[in-house]
């Protein structure tokens, strides 16, 4: 057997570079590159190997480990999990900075390979710099924090372990059901150790997309349920996008008249103006979709994990018979659903064939059509604003941004009030145009996520919308976007605090406390010049006061060749009243505030209503 002597780090990089996938009929590397912040735990081993790899596995420098991982995750999301990236850090804080991002990838079922440096496998120099010491367990390192937020975890303590660990990690990254982050904690002395690896190990390997057909019995049960339904409803989730099933979904809806509601991850599965598209569903949903959910006698989830925002904390369609189509059996069995375990596209195509002589009852179609028209009018009203409007609502800013962007633009958001408003109001015309991370709702994702999305879709305009709180939390990758020449547009809505949680605080009877800057303990209120800060990072930036000025600034941003930040102050208390559904946020049973007591009574009433038979 022919062998080649390589360090473990060199072998890892060489193997990663050889993995191939098919994208639109072209074989391309699965790993588009590696994000790296080097330290003593990875610079000598992986650093040397990545340098030698050159363009075979490009390496990008970042400013923050969490942010670089967000960029990697966003890249995979934008490409519908067809390709992924690698993230490597030193041990200690460099590694644990990535744990939040790993959790985000885990929740959202997105592939990313983490290669954090680890302590010495030999333990000769213990405790090394940044090493934690667990007095009762000598096998523990800081990287054990990755265990609960990784779909696959291994610690590389000998170079030959890579022969098993790398293919196992790759199998998870490419598995439609198990997809998520894989972590190989890489002991720093092992990175530098050499081993005679079989040359065959480094031959290019193709990893096709696996499509699992549904069990015939499960599928026929679903077909029968649809044929007997009076008010069926499809709920499209992220699995529709990851299965590249948008065309199949549209074809089924058009041939049968089945109405479709969209989750956060599923938004964009249908063109916003498709006659069967009811819009967003759930807590941040449209009035049309939520009314259909409450009237439904059959709800069919397609590639959704049925998060509480989708189900209205399990209250929105509790009266309906529930089917769950999903490649992941755990998701397919949620909430007592009748499971259909299989690939979303294959199931949708099979349903179209088996329902070619069936259509939704005409009365239901008429009701849905009227509700859709009414919702479109509500959206028009919510996003409208006079050009001279100052302190606009988030909805009005969304309207101005939508008007200024091309139809194929990608909007990126993650936390605060914007995901809710965008879910209701953003009109998505093309797949991949709505990139909102709301599974983990992670503040700080937005700018780094926009960078990753731009790397995945370089010809599309990518606009990140975020609040001042998220910007202050994590903005460093704005400088990286400038450095790499990946232009993004950032719209920063300055409501001087955490406006979304301030609204929730008041809604649950609380006093304004520690959310808005003015309601926080302070000696002086800061006047932060966000535009000046963005310019200091190398971006073009400007502050505007009105909606009209915002539109003009966005035109300049589109014309710019460099990342461009536009700042506008907004009303922290305003939100869209139309649409929406109940969300279970527990209110204290005992409080000295009468407002809390009143909110608790309303909460208990809502809990009783949820439990009532329908």
Image (spheres, rainbow, N blue to C red):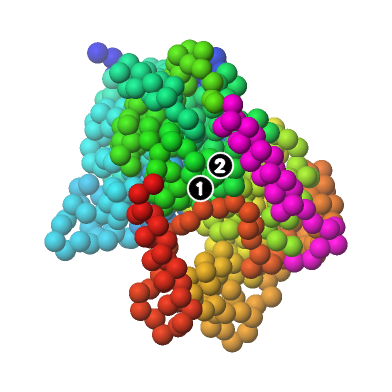
Residues drawn in magenta: 362-391
- Most foreground residue, 44 or 391: 391
CA gap, disc 2 and disc 1: 8 Å
Query: Which mark is in front, 2 or 1?
Result: 2
The x, y position of residue 85, in whole percent, is 47, 36
Q: Is residue 380 magenta?
A: yes
The x, y position of residue 416, in whole percent, is 56, 59
* Residue at image mark 2: 289
Please give the label number shown on residue 161: none
Predominant SS along the magenta part: helix
Task: Identify the residue at image location x=36%, y=53%.
Answer: 612
* Marks 2 and 1, the one that precedes in the sequence: 1
The x, y position of residue 513, in whole percent, is 52, 78
- Badge 2 marks a residue whose secondary structure is helix
* Residue at image mark 1: 282
Position above or below: 319 against 251: below
On screen, residue 129 versus residue 101, left or right, reads left
Residue 460: tell me if it is visible: no
* Label 1 Cα neighbours within 10 Å, binned few <14 / some 14-19 / many ≥20: many
On screen, residue 521 versus residue 318, left or right, reads right
Task: Identify the residue at image location x=34%, y=26%.
Answer: 341
Position above or below: 611 against 280: below
Residue 575: tell me if it is visible: yes
- Does the CB distance between marks 2 and 1 fall below 8 Å? yes
Task: Identify the residue at image location x=69%, y=55%.
Answer: 395
* Label 2 Cα neighbours within 10 Å, binned few <14 / some 14-19 / many ≥20: many
């Amino acid at each position: 057997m022919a062998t080649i002597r390589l360090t473990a780090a060199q072998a890892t990089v060489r193997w990663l570079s050889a993995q191939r996938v098919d994208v639109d009929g072209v074989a391309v590397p699965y790993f588009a590159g590696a994000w790296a912040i080097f330290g003593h735990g990875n610079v000598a081993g992986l650093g040397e190997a990545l340098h030698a790899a050159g363009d075979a596995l490009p390496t990008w420098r970042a400013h923050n480990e969490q942010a670089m991982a967000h960029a990697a995750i966003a890249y995979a999301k934008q490409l519908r999990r067809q390709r992924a990236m690698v993230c490597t850090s030193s041990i200690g804080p460099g590694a644990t900075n990535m744990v939040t991002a790993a959790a985000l990838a885990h929740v959202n079922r997105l592939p990313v390979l983490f290669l954090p440096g680890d302590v010495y496998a030999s333990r000769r120099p213990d405790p090394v710099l940044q090493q934690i010491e667990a007095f009762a367990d000598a096998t523990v390192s800081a990287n054990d924090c990755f265990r609960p937020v990784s779909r696959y975890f291994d610690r590389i303590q000998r170079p030959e372990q890579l022969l098993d660990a790398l293919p196992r990690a790759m199998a998870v990254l490419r598995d439609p059901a198990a997809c998520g982050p894989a972590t190989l904690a890489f002991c720093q002395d092992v990175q530098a150790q050499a081993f005679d690896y079989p040359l065959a190990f480094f031959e290019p390997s193709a990893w096709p997309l696996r499509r699992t057909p549904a069990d015939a019995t499960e599928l026929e049960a679903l077909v029968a349920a649809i044929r007997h339904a009076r008010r069926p409803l499809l709920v499209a989730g992220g699995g529709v996008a990851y299965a590249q099933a948008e065309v199949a979904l549209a074809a089924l809806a058009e041939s049968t008249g089945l109405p479709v509601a969209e989750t956060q991850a599923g938004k964009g599965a249908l063109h916003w103006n498709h006659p069967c598209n009811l819009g967003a569903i759930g807590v941040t949903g449209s009035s049309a979709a939520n009314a259909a959910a409450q009237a439904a006698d059959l709800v069919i989830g397609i590639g959704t994990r049925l998060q509480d925002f989708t189900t209205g904390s399990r209250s929105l369609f509790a009266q309906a018979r529930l089917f769950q189509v999903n490649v992941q059996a755990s998701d397919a069995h949620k909430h007592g659903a009748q499971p259909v375990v299989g690939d979303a596209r294959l199931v949708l195509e099979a349903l179209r064939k088996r329902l070619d002589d069936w259509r939704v009852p005409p009365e239901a179609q008429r009701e849905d059509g009227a509700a859709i028209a009414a919702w479109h009018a509500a959206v028009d009203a919510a996003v409208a604003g006079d050009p001279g409007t100052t302190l606009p609502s988030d909805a009005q800013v969304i309207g101005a941004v939508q008007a200024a962007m091309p139809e194929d633009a990608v909007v990126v958001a993650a936390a605060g009030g914007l995901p809710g408003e965008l879910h209701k109001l953003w009109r998505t015309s093309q797949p991949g145009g709505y990139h909102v991370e709301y599974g983990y709702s992670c503040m700080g994702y937005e700018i780094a996520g926009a960078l990753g999305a731009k790397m995945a879709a370089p010809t599309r305009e990518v606009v990140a919308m975020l609040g001042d709180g998220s910007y202050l939390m994590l903005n460093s990758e704005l400088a990286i976007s400038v450095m790499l020449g990946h232009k993004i547009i950032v719209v920063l809505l300055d409501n001087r605090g955490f406006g979304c949680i301030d609204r929730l605080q008041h809604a649950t009877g609380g006093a304004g406390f520690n959310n808005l800057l003015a309601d926080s303990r302070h000696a002086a209120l800061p006047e932060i010049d966000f535009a000046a800060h963005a310019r200091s990072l190398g971006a073009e930036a400007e502050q505007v006061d009105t909606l009209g000025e915002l539109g003009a600034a966005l035109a300049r941003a589109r014309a710019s060749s460099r990342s461009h930040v536009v700042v506008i102050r907004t009303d922290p208390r305003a939100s869209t009243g139309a649409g929406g559904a109940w969300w279970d946020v527990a209110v204290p049973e005992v409080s000295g505030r009468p407002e809390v007591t009143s909110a608790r009574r309303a909460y208990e009433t809502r809990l009783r209503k949820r439990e009532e038979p329908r």
